[in-house]
Amino acid sequence: MKNFNFQNPTRILFGKGRIADLNDQIPSDAKVMILFGGGSAERSGVLGQIREALAGRTLVEFGGIEPNPRYATALKAVDMINENNVDFLLAVGGGSVIDATKFIAAATKYEGDAWEILTSYGSVIKEAMPFGSVLTLPATGSEMNSGGVITNPEKEAKLPFNSSHCFPVFSVLDPEITYTLPPRQVANGVVDAFVHTMEQYLTYPSAAYVQDGFAETLLRTLIELGPKALETPKDYDIRSNLMWTATLALNGLIGAGVPQDWASHMIGHEITALNDTDHARTLAVVLPSLMNDQRDRKREKLLQYAANVWNIRDGSEDARIDAVIDSTRRFFEQMGIKTHLSDYAIGAPEIDHIVNALKEHGMTTLGEHDAITPEDARRILNAAL
Ligand code: NZQ
Ligand code: ZN
């Protein structure tokens, strides 16, 4: 196992009706800004529950944060915070709203050009406003981690940032508020959490037995419950387990002390930057192709994954690896997510564009060995057509 620091300061309030406990989580004299997306939180009644829980406080509201949140929108929120002397932020939504809130929390305190936060991948962040979240879409783990991803269409860029100053103070996870999710978003959430787990697990053995065991349990849970959540949308046991699984998949726990990959994510971000494809869908295209392409480097973990997650134990090594890649792809397709680039209107010219964008964004040494170059990404993408 590698050396590691592990500290996760986010308090989780999990379960039915927990929005009612919000008031105690926010300093009583704080002026609060509620940030949300395109309207689902209003329609579902979640915002109503929050206004009720925070009755008597002075609230400012900022709506309209897009999926794949936009840089320009985030800067508008920064202006509104400064004009209104806001001192606590409450993100209400999925990964996009929470990521945008993290960026806004950091940008409000940053004296230079906010774009530098992204070009430095967050390293220039020295402080951020305090914020909490009410999670409405289990997927990204943003509710309990310190990272985010912001899109700037003018620069054709979707860039990640990370800073220890960007953990939520608290996050409310009420599985019942995920009942209103459309099947597409349920599927996206399951596949995103699945690929987060894979990016921290499917590398090479590092004698991290507990992290491997946790990761395998998360993967098996997603495989078992993901399709059931589509069939039976209002089942509390299914939704609560999926919600907690998605959080644990990217809150630092399974990634502590192990090699990590993240190449599927970095390649996937360039696809979204190009044509706004849903984040999880880009991963469902890239990961199976990358598993096949990197089968020699990942051989031991591919065989462990085959045995412990899919119970594939018979046949030659290559036959087991073929079978487990096929099972992974079929799982994504079973969730209703297509796994080829041509399903998302991407052909050879777009692949050129993606490869160039990877170079431009410094994504030239990806994967657990820092060995996946943009030309390797081209081969992976060509095989995913
Ligand atoms: O905008 P509204 O109207 O609220 O609708 C949203 C949005 O259209 C809707 N929605 C959310 N909760 C709902 C709901 N609809 C009905 N009922 C509910 N309870 O779902 C749509 C998608 O929301 P979004 O927040 O975009 O989805 P997700 O949580 O999948 O977040 C994706 C973003 O997170 C980033 C992705 O790159 C992408 O930008 N990621 C963030 C990570 C992190 N912070 O650690 C890691 C991930 O790998 C990922 O990159
Ligand atoms: Zn992701």
Image: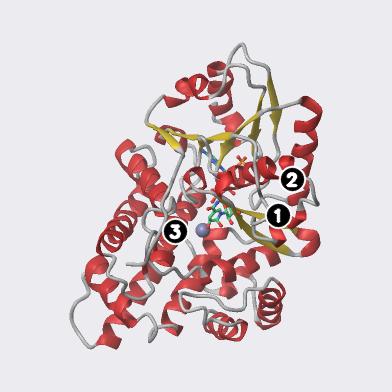
Q: How is the image coloured?
A: secondary structure
Label 1 element class: helix
Sequence-first disc among 1 and 2: 2
Q: Quadrant of the C terminus?
A: bottom right
Three-letter code, disc 1: Ile
Label 3 element class: helix
Image marks 1 and 2: residues in contact by CB distance under 8 Å: yes
The residue to which callout 1 is attached is 117
Sequence-first disc among 3 and 2: 2
Question: Is residue 179 visible from the viewing direction of this image?
Answer: no
Three-letter code, disc 2: Tyr
In the displayed structure, 188 sits above or below 204; it is above
Q: Where does the image place residue 251, in percent across and percent down from the top left?
A: 43, 50
Q: Please tell me which residue lies in front, 209 or 334.
A: 209
Q: CA distance from mark 3 to mark 2?
A: 34 Å
The residue to which callout 2 is attached is 110
Q: Residue furthest top?
A: 56
Q: Residues within 10 Å of mark 3 (few under 14, many from 20)?
A: many
Question: Is residue 347 visible from the viewing direction of this image?
Answer: yes
For discs 3 and 2, the disc positioned in front in the rendered view: 2
Q: Where does the image place residue 62, in percent across and percent down from the top left?
A: 71, 32
In the displayed structure, 31 sits above or below 241; it is above
Query: Left or right: 156 with respect to 312?
Result: right
Q: Please tell me which residue lies in front, 242 or 298.
A: 298
